Image: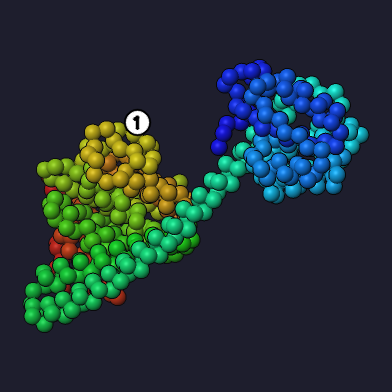
């Protein structure tokens, strides 16, 4: 698309070439319009003349025209010809030339982008040049906009087709995987009835498969509708924490991370899947960037907000790493932002996603110093009161013992959802203990 018409002095070599069509039944009136155009645009102007509607249409059909100056009194009516241009030749700007007394009527009748009106009679070259340039600029901006919209629609259609094809193939693969894995679980149950470790490992793999399928469904929903399910519900943070730690246990075991969960954890008014995204992203962030290399520790609890906020509850996920400098405690929630010196692992979007989800539910998220050293991410969301998710797994710390966990996880606690895991009888219990020195 060429640049908008410039208004340099006549003969300026860098001025954009302009192709103008002058339509008027009288030759002398056409000359009166052509003269100021030539005065301003000089050799950069190419003029076409037409005395009738048919001649004008012939010029428009035979070569591209940037701007058409059309007399209101042309046969068939100037406004009718302008309307024809807008429909059949949208790349051509139009200027309706009307008698002074008819100018208000003409201006009110022509409201399309790129259409200007001027009064017939003595015409100043500079004023006419500005009118021409403005009309041409509007048309080109409109054409650029329409082209952008068409490209976006085409891209959206291609993306939708790609997502549908991807979802079809991925769903087919998940069906095969689930069928094969079910056979493997049955075989393990028959051949290794006493080896709970193998059964727990199989349960872990199935949990990860289930969560991956949920992520795929979110992606499909996002591609089809432009949004994902955000409908709030009563979400039990305790059971969600158990699920996330169970799914992340390979990394936790690999790095020998001590995980301490201090309950009870709150019940929040938030979409359960979105709350699980929050917990997962914060746990992964701690595993990637926030743990002491020698004695890594992850602590999850619910700090008391006191009387300042009686309608919300908080979830705190703390680590014992190097912490976050005060100057960076708001910046790190920006998409793609990383602390100086961090490695390139991850996309830099985890904390940005957390803030986006929390903001949707009128909550907040912040980072502060962890009680045990390091960083603690505190999420505040609307509360439904406190409740322990899995009472059999939680124990109360003795009074007066200070900062002690009620449960020390060995990363093998499964989901508390019996429909996902029917193997809870194989969960090994770990006695609670204090924080390692």
Q: Is residue 100 toward the left or the right of residue 284 in the image?
A: right
Q: Is mark 1 on a helix, strand or loop?
A: helix
Q: Residues within 10 Å of mark 1 (few under 14, many from 20)?
A: few
Could you tell me residue 101's position as x and y percent? 91, 34
Q: Which residue is drawn at 73% across and 19% down?
A: 39
Q: Is residue 66 toward the left or the right of residue 329 in the image?
A: right
Could you tell me residue 224's position as x and y percent? 46, 62
Could you tell me residue 63's position as x and y percent? 64, 40
Q: Is residue 16 toward the left or the right of residue 433 in the image?
A: right
Q: Mark 1 points at which residue?
A: 327
Q: Residue at x 67, y 29 (%)?
A: 46
> Picture quarter containing residue 126?
top right
- Which of the pair 135/304 is nearer the observer? 135
Q: Is residue 219 toward the left or the right of residue 105 in the image?
A: left
Q: In which quarter of the image is the C terminus?
A: top left
> Picture quarter containing residue 96?
top right
Could you tell me residue 313's position as x and y percent? 40, 54
> Picture quarter containing residue 168?
bottom left
Q: Residue at x 55, y 49 (%)?
A: 149
- Which of the pair 277/380 is nearer the observer? 277
Decide if residue 345 is in sight here.
yes
- Which of the pair 189/81 is nearer the observer? 81
Q: Residue at x 77, y 26 (%)?
A: 34
């Amino acid at each position: 698309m060429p640049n908008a018409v410039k208004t340099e002095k006549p003969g300026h070599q860098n001025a954009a070439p302009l192709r103008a069509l002058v339509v008027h039944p009288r030759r002398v009136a056409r000359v009166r319009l052509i003269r100021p155009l030539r005065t301003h645009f000089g050799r950069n102007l190419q003029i076409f003349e037409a005395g009738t509607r048919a001649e004008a249409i012939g010029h428009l059909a035979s070569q591209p025209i940037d701007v058409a100056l059309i007399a209101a009194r042309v046969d068939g009516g100037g406004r009718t010809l302008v309307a024809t241009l807008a429909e059949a030749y949208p790349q051509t700007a139009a200027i309706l030339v009307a008698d002074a007394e008819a100018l208000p009527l003409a201006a009110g009748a022509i409201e399309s982008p790129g259409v200007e009106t001027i009064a017939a009679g003595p015409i100043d070259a500079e004023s006419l040049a500005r009118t021409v340039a403005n009309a041409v600029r509007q048309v080109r901006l409109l054409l650029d906009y329409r082209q952008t919209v068409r490209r976006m629609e085409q891209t959206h259609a291609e993306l939708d087709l790609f997502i549908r094809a991807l979802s079809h193939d991925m769903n087919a693969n998940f069906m095969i995987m689930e069928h094969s894995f079910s056979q493997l679980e049955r075989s393990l149950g028959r051949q290794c009835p006493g080896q709970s470790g193998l059964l727990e490992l199989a349960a872990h793999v199935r949990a990860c498969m289930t969560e991956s399928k949920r992520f795929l469904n979110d992606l499909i929903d996002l591609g089809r509708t432009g949004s994902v399910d955000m409908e709030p519900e009563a979400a039990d943070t305790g059971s969600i924490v158990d699920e996330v730690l169970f799914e992340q246990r390979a990394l936790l075991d690999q790095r020998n991370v001590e995980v301490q969960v201090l309950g009870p954890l709150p019940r929040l008014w938030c979409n359960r899947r979105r709350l699980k995204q929050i917990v997962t992203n914060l746990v992964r962030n701690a595993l990637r960037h926030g743990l002491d290399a020698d004695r890594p520790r992850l602590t999850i609890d619910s700090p008391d907000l006191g009387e300042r906020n009686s309608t919300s509850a908080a979830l705190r996920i703390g680590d014992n790493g190097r912490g976050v400098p005060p100057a960076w405690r708001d910046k790190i929630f920006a998409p793609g932002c990383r602390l100086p010196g961090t490695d390139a692992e991850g996309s830099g979007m985890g904390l940005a996603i957390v803030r986006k989800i929390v903001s949707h539910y009128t909550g907040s998220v912040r980072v502060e110093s962890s009680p045990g050293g390091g960083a603690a991410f505190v999420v505040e969301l609307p509360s439904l009161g406190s409740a322990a998710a899995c009472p059999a797994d939680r124990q109360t710390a003795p009074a007066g013992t200070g900062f002690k966990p009620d449960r020390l996880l060995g990363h093998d606690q499964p989901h508390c959802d019996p429909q996902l895991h029917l193997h809870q009888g194989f969960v090994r219990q770990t006695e609670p203990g204090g924080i390692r020195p």
